[in-house]
Amino acid sequence: MSRHLRKRSFRLAGHRTSVALEPEFWAAVEAIAARRAQSLAALVAEVDAARPDPTLPLASALRLLALREAGDSGGQDGPPPRSIRE
């Protein structure tokens, strides 16, 4: 696992699984859970259950959720993303 990824473990559908995301994506997913008055684990389980294609990695589904939510809010949840080169 790359050093810039942070891994978290969850129990989904009775099985333990780990998800690795960049800290910025974890912050976005945590903010979404807070806005929805859900725990992080509940939101991750919801995203897991809603994946239309089970071959889509859970980490990818969480990143897509974060991007979708950022687009819906007009990006008002925080500073603009930094360039990859920064």
Image (spheres, rainbow, N blue to C red):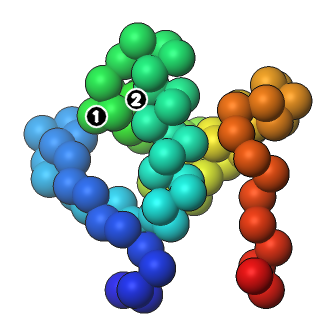
Residue at 81% over, 36% down: 75
- Using the rendered view, name the quadrant where residue 48 is placed: top left
| Residue most extreme to the right | 74
Q: Type of residue at label 2?
A: Leu
x then y, percent, for residue 11: 17, 43
x then y, percent, for residue 21: 46, 64
Above or below, 86 relative to 8: below
x then y, percent, for residue 8: 27, 57
Q: Is residue 31 left or right of residue 68?
A: left
x then y, percent, for residue 74: 87, 30
| Label annotation for residue 12 | none
Name the foreground residue: 53 vs 10.
10
Name the foreground residue: 58 vs 5.
5
Residue at 36% over, 68% down: 6
What residue would you read off at disc 1?
41
Q: Looking at the rendering, in which quadrant would you find the N terminus?
A: bottom left
Q: Type of residue at label 1?
A: Ala
Q: Looking at the rendering, in which quadrant would you find the C terminus?
A: bottom right
Task: Give the structural element (helix, strand or loop) at label 1.
Answer: helix
What residue would you read off at disc 2?
43
Q: Is residue 69 left or right of residue 47?
A: right
Residue at 75% over, 36% down: 70
C-alpha separation, residue under disc 2 versus residue under disc 1: 5 Å
Task: Give the structural element (helix, strand or loop) at label 2.
Answer: helix
